[in-house]
Image: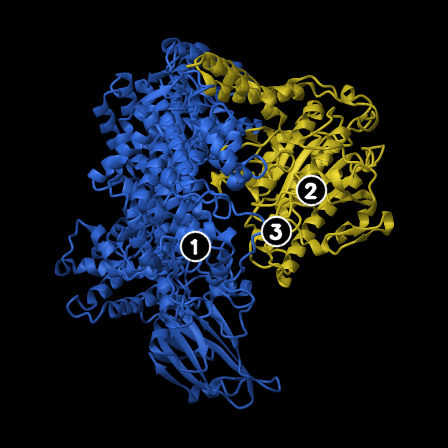
Amino acid sequence: MQKQFAQFAQVYCYECHGPQNAEAELDLRTILESPKGFAAHTEALELVYDAVDFEDMPPSKYKQPSDDERSAAIDQILGMKELLEQQSLNDPGLVVMPRLTRSEYDRVIRDITGKPISVSHILPDEGGAGEGFSNVGEAHSVSIMQIEKYLDASKLVLEHLVATPDGWYWSERPLKDAKTPEETVENMKLAIRRIYSEIENRVQDGHRDAIRRAVREKLAASSDDGEVPKDKQEFAKRSDDIHYLEATWRYLHRQELGFSADDLETLAKAVHPELRADVLGKFLKVLGQAEDEDAPGLLKDRVAALQALPGPSEVESREALQEDILNIYQLWTRPPRWPGHHWTQNHFPDYEVSNQRVQDMQEDLKALRWPFRIKLEDKEKFEELYLVVTQAADGSEGDLVHWRDGSFELEDGSKVPWDKALRDGEPVTGPVEALTIDGKPVLAAKSPTVIRLPIPENAAFFEVTAAIPDEARETSTVQVIIRPTQPDEKDLFYYDKRHPLGHWKESPVIEKWYGVMGDSQEFWRERNNHLLKEDHTVYQGLDKETLDALGMNGVEGKVKEENEKAKKNPYFFSVAELRELASPEQLASLKQLETLITGMARRMTAEEEPSAEELRGIAAKQIEQFMDMAWRRYVTDGEVEEMLALFDETMGKEGTSYEESLKLAVTGVMMSPYFIYRYPVTTPENTAGQDVVALTSHELASRLSFALWASIPDQQLLDLAKADKLRNPDVLLAQARRMLQDPRAAAMSEEFSAQWFRFANFDQFSEPDSQLFPEFTPDIAKAMYQEMRHFFLDLIQNNRPITNVLQADYTFANEKLAEFYGMDANVEGAEFRRVKVDTDHRGGVIGMGAILTRNAAAQRTSPVKRGVWVFEEVLGGHIPNPPADVPPLSDGERNEEGMTVVEQLAVHRDNPACYSCHAKFDPLGIALENFDPIGRWREKDSAGEPVANSDTMPDGKTLTGFQDLRSYLVGRQDEFVNHFCRKLLGYMLGRGVELGDRPLMEDMKTSLKENDYRFQAALEVILQSPQYLNRRVQANLEASTDSTENNPNS
Amino acid sequence: MNRRAVLKTLGATMALPIFESFAPVSRLSAAPAGIGSVPAGPPRRFATMLFANGVNVDHWWAKGEGDAMELSSTLQPLAPFKNDILVLNKLEYFGGTSGAHWPQFTNFLSGTQLRQSPLPDAARSIDQVIADVVGRETFLPSMHLGVEPAKPGLRLGVPAIYYSTVSWTSKNTPIPPEVYPAAAFDRLFNKEGLLRNKSVLDLTLEQSKRLRRDLSGQDRHKLDQFMDNVRNLEQRIERATAEDRLEGWTPTIAEPNMDRPPEGKPQDFPDHTKMMLDLMVLALQMDKTRVITFIMESDATGLKFDFIDGVGRAGMHGISHHSGKKDVLEEYRRINNWHVKQLAYIMGRMKEVDEGNGSLLDNTMLLFGSNMMDGNKHDGTELPLILCGGKNCDVKPGRVLTYQDDECEFNNLHLAMAQRMGVKIDNFGDSKMALPRLV
């Protein structure tokens, strides 16, 4: 058949498709003159079949075959196809032993260590082969650099390992090299502190930032200029506290509102999606102490104020409630500061020229006095003087202050005492008593007071000192300030950012302030630092004996102090509290570290060191355990012994610790081909004489886990493999179903669908012109990636119809993405969830931002890129590379003549050389023109013209806009389903799909059709196929389309 | 199953070019009389600095000789080096290939045309051919640097790595460029770390041999490639242990005169480039390697050069498709000019290193240029190329050469350079002759 067809091709094809020209990358002559013919070029055979059958070729301007010739040629092609199909029918095919790919490497390490350790960024990127996937062994080359990088990677992984004879601990973050037991202990202490710090961050910082950011963005979006309105700025800044207070208010009224005291989660989420139940719990715990006798007065006030707020039935609106809370809050949350703390923030009017040197001021404040020198130059401003004493927000009225030593300095430099002014002045608010002390007039004022004084003519300066008299040293805490106008009542309670004057060191008031209401963020940082630096965090999980051995005694005081502090501050968690909030994994890590430290302490104080023999035995056990997992099988004693030789090399030598020696052996395990390659376990001896052998249970376990999880099998799979149960099809299917429900199945979405639809690295995509599209932020790129990742994960795990890819009425979004897309859906917070979409604008992959943005140019949309993408990735077509000298399209939306890209394309297609391909995909891309270059819906282009979104396919269908394209693609659903089957089969098998796979492909399609097109229907057909369950031992299948001469089988 | 055919296939796949590198070739004995004979003294070095996506052709030219040479605005930074550059005009890519990007980048040094295939498929590149001969005498046979990591997977139906490497150890094995300066530094100087790996690699090889017995066909072939490279690394370790030197010549410095660069990939692109250039000078000066490739800009890259005054936020690839627009052409020129400035920087540094018989620059053939002329057309009918330095390598710089007819084949240049490095070959790829008139 090949021979006959070659005669036909010689006449009609070689001129363009010979070695010289090889148009469309097709050199038929070379193929047909080779002994294997199309066997090595099955995809070319498909192309030729279509071209001849549809009479696309030869092109009309060339000599045409007669009808008889053409039908004979078609028969010959079909014959060759049939021959190839028969020769390779259901053959497992050439699946070359794959090595760990870059992304598999991280997942394998994660599954061995139990920690999300990522080192793959240093590994070279992978190519792809077969149906375009990186898990195809055929594509895995190894350069010397790859070896070096594997060495580097193993070194990086081992930076996470603490190894002692008592066991191993894998730390999520790298640790330092440990050459001595003491250094190992330090590493473990650091690891413990980090875990507490992690818990803290989880409970605190992340969500606080998230709430603030979300509120800020919301406020900014609702204002005209995109800024947070002035009157809302305070709200934005304090939004997390305000939301907690609102939650507290709801808690107080929980019965009326229908919340349960046990379900803080629901209550918290009702207020704000980022609000955490554990922090709310702490809030309530702190506020709950208000009942206690000795509770700080302010705490009582706070609770009382909350209780005094109108109840749910009386509240006008949520906004009004939040406004009320904000008002109360503002009064409370501006703590007075004392010198040395945030000096620059203090309120200092520019006319107050005294105390400008910090040092002087600190001296004065210590002496409980405040000397004023007021510049009266600006007569318009200063008609009168107001001497103000506030409560300093401590809720205690009547704190005593003396105003004394007053005088005016006149413009000529002379000084006059303030006696006359005192006579003409008057108290405006509060009790004032005029005294004479040491013959001088003194005004005794009790907070809060305002005294008005007139200013004599020609006065340039006023001087006076406010001082707390001895008898009030222990009780007075006030603020003093002099103003040109009368202060309002709020200022008399607390004057914003003004230093307090008082005996602050002992002042219970300030202590309370600091303890209860201080700037929580600042506390928080301090807290974190504590955890990272100090031993008392580690202390709480260790027994006394261990502490003594490590020289860590005497930290109990710190712990006590911390617990006291934690009682008062809603944001301050003691280590004991953090332990309660730890996840089970974190708690397990803490306990493991504590066990290891305890063991280490015992060893360090033990009288006798363990013998070298004993240590070697321990190392052997530890290494073997690691090897079993890393090599995905049970290793032999000989293999362990081999690794121990590396351990022996340095163990016991000066300056080398147990940990270091052990790590060298583990490096050996990770550099072994048994780790790096997914090797077949069946050996040639037991496959002698066979071309194809059944996979063993162990091989099946590995094949399944690397397909569904892109990682190693778990214990359950290994156990089943050991019992040789996986060859039972029911067991295998049950395992596959179980594995798809496991979180590790995320790999199916992150590898299979991400490589297929080419969104794998979209979270780092940054090509859109950032000046034209400032809205396309890194966060949006990440959100678009997550949308697709979640969409496919859901599709795979929940076994949804694969046709949803074309026409889903839902997608996945978080608040940011929903807002970016302009969705109506009520989506709050950073979490992704399934949301219904308006199917006129979204739904299915063609409406997803990542696809639309990646397939655009930097400054405009690209109907070409989008069209090719749809044609190739959705419909499974193929477009050859464009020829040289293609006239370029404009960079921006219009060219210099003002033509849009769509118009330019129309001109482009007038050229017949361009038409044949562009006609197939341009309309597909043009129909997506309602999406701007970063995937937002638009009706008009940047020039304000209505978007041109209509064009006609070669089959006569006119596509106008998104909706049309969707239904059109649904109409061509069979092509998509076929493409899906091809992709999935290629991914699962790790090779390209061959002609002999056609029956399997048909089975997949039938099963899909019978099962509502549900994803797992296709997957399960593959899992039961001979292709999946067997392995070709002999490298090459002997196939050829030449059935006459060279084929030895004929 | 036909046994003979199977063996035939196996035989074909086993013939790996990598084995060629084990043939013992001494540098001196490899040198034929005449052009390729390398005198004793400081060794010759070979380096390339390649930027993809072509140039603004209106501003890429040089006229005249020596001090009287006139330079276009793009080439102005080379004004102090008029006697150190050889401007090569009219060399063409495989009979003037134009078309998609990938067929004319990754094969820049490979001398082979590419076909569209999802598997990497080029040929051993000239830097590796040279390293086979001169690389055996240095700590590293060759070094490959870049500033953009290789992209994963396929791009337009071919391996994405086609857009980011020009070095190939074998037909199917591209070498991804090292983009982490700290890793490149360690590769040059972390001898202790390297030595520690010796026993690990011994064991890896031991186990590979065992595993190999259990494999068949293609799997064996894959493992062979792995084992070959483990062996290569072991050889490097052995060389590091020996640290033998050419008689009568020692490098001008024995310890690195720069600090180890910070971990990770530098955020600032110009800084990153400078670090790589400094590493190049250091590696050559200390004779840690004699062969370096540096990819200053990947093919069809979206990289932004907006740190250059007058260059906007559009990606490089977009700018190279300037459609004849004046403002875009000006951006294009400024980017080309920036690359030339980098060249001037490294030439200046190399000139400062006095190696006795001349400067480090005189002992290095540094090829600078791009894989296409006008990026707008992907024009491979002539290439923008400058051969720098090489006064002691049978090259006479300070001139502008324009080639014609059979001379124009780009591989002629590869052949001429390889011969000057002491490699005994008569052709490379589809070379027609060693490029004449270099001296």
> Vertically, is B409 above or below A843?
above
Q: Name the image quarter holding residue A594.
A: top left
* Same-subunit check for callouts 1 and 3: no
Mark 3 to mark 2 CA distance (whole Å): 14 Å
User: Do the CB atoms of the residues marked 3 and 2 lie less than 8 Å apart?
Assistant: no
Kindly state the secondary structure of the residue where label 3 is placed: loop
Mark 2 to mark 1 CA distance (whole Å): 34 Å
Q: Earlier in the sequence, mark 3 or mark 2?
A: 2
- Image quarter (top left, top right, bottom left or bottom right) of the C terminus of chain A: top left
One can see residue A434 in this view: yes
* Same-subunit check for callouts 2 and 1: no
Circle 3 crowding by C-alpha within 10 Å: few under 14, some 14–19, many from 20: many
Q: Which mark is residue B377?
A: 3
Q: Chain A hue?
A: blue
User: Chain for mark 1?
Assistant: A
User: Chain for mark 3?
Assistant: B
